[in-house]
Image (cartoon, helix red, strand yellow):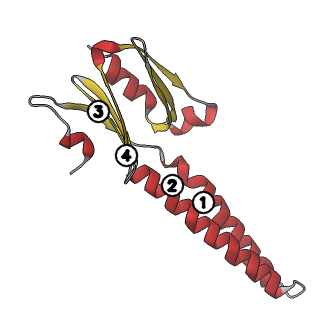
Amino acid sequence: MSYVKSVLQPGEKIRYATDIHWIIYLPGLGLLALSGAAYWMALQPVSAYRIWVWIAAILCVAAAVALFVGWFRRWTTEIAVTDRRIIYKRGFIRRRTIEMHLDKVESVDVDQSIIGRIMNFGDIMIRGVGVGIEPLKNIDSPIAFRNHVTAE
């Protein structure tokens, strides 16, 4: 059972749930492409075969680690808007949760780059009465998230 569903109060309903955007996999995919290029260099007849194979292997391991970290971060993060509050949870063993009642929200700021607008991801900053939630980075569909928070 997800964290969000386990903390719902009686009668509380989830309006919107989102994730971290898949863009977090790009560093790992870039390292994987570099690994492929290094292996391709090893297959060239004038190259130093062993050096390029080692470089390809190191880059492949780094890519696997980066992809795993991205997957784990995405898997252990939950973001939801209910009809009463905003719930943000991240972490697996060391869990960090933040909840804010919707009547305490002053503003929801969305920051999107050009690439973020094209691919529909961005950063969200929720400002509440006297306190704010830390920036939520690389959130999928940030405008839809904001609309569900500010909808009455």
Q: What is the x, y in percent for residue 54?
A: 74, 80
Q: Verify CB contact (< 8 Å) between mark 2 and mark 4.
A: no
Q: Secondary structure at mark 4?
A: loop
Q: Verify CB contact (< 8 Å) between mark 2 and mark 1.
A: yes
Q: Identify the amino acid type marked 1.
A: Gly
Q: Which residue shows up at 57% across the image and 35% down it?
A: 116
Q: What is the x, y in percent for residue 6?
A: 19, 43
- What is the distance, in whole Å, between disc 1 and disc 4 at their CAs? 24 Å
Q: Which mark is residue 42?
A: none
Which quarter of the figure has residue 46? bottom right
N-terminal of the pair, mark 3 or mark 4, is 3
User: Is 141 or 74 nearer to us in this picture?
Assistant: 74
Residue receiving disc 1: 28
Q: Identify the amino acid type marked 4.
A: Arg
Q: Which residue shows up at 54% across the image and 47% down it?
A: 23
Q: Secondary structure at mark 1?
A: helix
N-terminal of the pair, mark 2 or mark 3, is 3
Q: Identify the amino acid type marked 2.
A: Gly
Residue receiving disc 2: 70
Residue receiving disc 3: 16
Q: Verify CB contact (< 8 Å) between mark 1 and mark 3.
A: no
Q: Which mark is residue 95?
A: 4
